[in-house]
Image (tube, grey):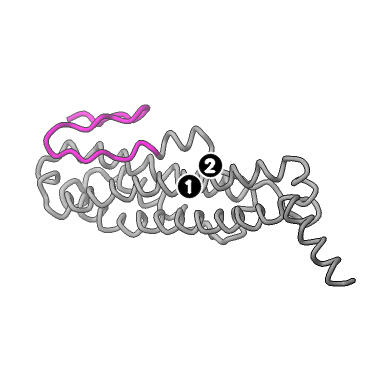
């Protein structure tokens, strides 16, 4: 009798989305881990990038300091697995990463004013690595967004929502559309033509 009840319970849970929650929750965790991995890769590039720029454009203290401070703000946020279950903490993390993206964009715009910097092999290599990392961040974020979307639809849909309430599955936060547009504008690598100036970024006078 007990075995029959267990089988019946398993069938009911399967039909009410339990397996979907298990699968999508694991997908979210894996996608989030990759997002963090790529963000960390970007963060690791910044000290060398800042030092290289400083060697040719030490007078651009405001821009260099902006990147350093933005990186510090990102580092001050503990990106634990639980962060993706806390809407406020997730929004704070997202805002900090967005500020770092903007600061890096300003740094690359400023670098256009220094031909010797642009011709430096180390700078060119770091810039290419940064562009590749930004592209991987966009891909990782998109995968996370899709995983969260599938999960959240199940949480809100009947009868899966009953299973969600029973087992404590709640809607998870995701990246906003506005921030996704911003992060998708990865710094372009071009050693021959001037780079496009991102919106709302003033180019210092030569």
Residue 2 highlighted magenta (yes or no): no
Position of residue 152 measured from the top left corner of the image (x, y, whole percent): 65, 44
Instruction: Point out the stretch of residues depicted in magenta.
Output: 184-206
In the image, taking residue 156 as reference, residue 147 lies left or right, namely left
Mark 1 — residue?
A: 143
Specify the quadrant that holds the C terminus. top left
Q: Quadrant of residue 10?
A: bottom right
Circle 1 crowding by C-alpha within 10 Å: few under 14, some 14–19, many from 20: some
Numbered marks: total: 2
Q: Residue at x 81, y 55 (%)?
A: 166
Judged from this view, the residue extending furthest toward the bottom is 2
Position of residue 62 measured from the top left corner of the image (x, y, whole percent): 32, 43
Specify the quadrant that holds the N terminus. bottom right
* CB-based contact (under 8 Å), mark 2 and mark 1: no
Position of residue 50 measured from the top left corner of the image (x, y, whole percent): 27, 52
Image height of 48 relative to 56, above or below: below
Q: CA distance from mark 2 to mark 1?
A: 11 Å
Which numbered marker is on residue 130?
Answer: none
Q: Residue at x 78, y 44 (%)?
A: 159
Disc nearest the viewer among 2 and 1: 1
Q: Mainly helix, strand or loop, the magenta region? A: loop
Image height of 81 relative to 200, above or below: below
In the image, taking residue 36 as reference, residue 88 lies left or right, namely right
Position of residue 27 measured from the top left corner of the image (x, y, whole percent): 55, 55
Mark 2 — residue?
A: 175
SS under mark 2: loop
Q: Quadrant of residue 187?
A: top left
């Amino acid at each position: 009798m007990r075995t029959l009840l267990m089988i019946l319970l398993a069938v009911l849970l399967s039909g009410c989305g339990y397996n979907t929650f298990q699968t999508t929750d694991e997908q979210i965790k894996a996608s989030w881990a990759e997002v963090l991995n790529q963000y960390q890769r970007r963060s690791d590039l910044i000290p060398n990038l800042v030092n290289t720029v400083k060697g040719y454009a030490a007078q651009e203290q405001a821009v260099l300091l902006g990147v350093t401070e933005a990186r510090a703000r990102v580092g001050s946020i503990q990106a634990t697995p639980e962060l993706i279950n806390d809407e406020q903490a997730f929004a704070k993390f997202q805002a900090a990463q967005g500020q770092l993206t903007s600061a890096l964009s300003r740094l690359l715009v400023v670098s256009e004013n220094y031909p010797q910097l642009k011709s430096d092999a180390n700078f060119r290599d770091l810039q290419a690595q940064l562009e590749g990392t930004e592209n991987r961040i966009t891909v990782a974020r998109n995968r996370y967004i899709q995983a969260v979307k599938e999960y959240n639809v199940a949480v809100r849909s009947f009868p899966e929502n009953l299973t969600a309430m029973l087992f404590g599955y709640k809607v998870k936060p995701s990246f906003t559309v506005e921030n996704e547009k911003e992060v998708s504008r990865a710094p372009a690598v071009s050693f021959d033509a001037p780079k496009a100036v991102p919106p709302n970024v003033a180019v210092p006078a030569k």
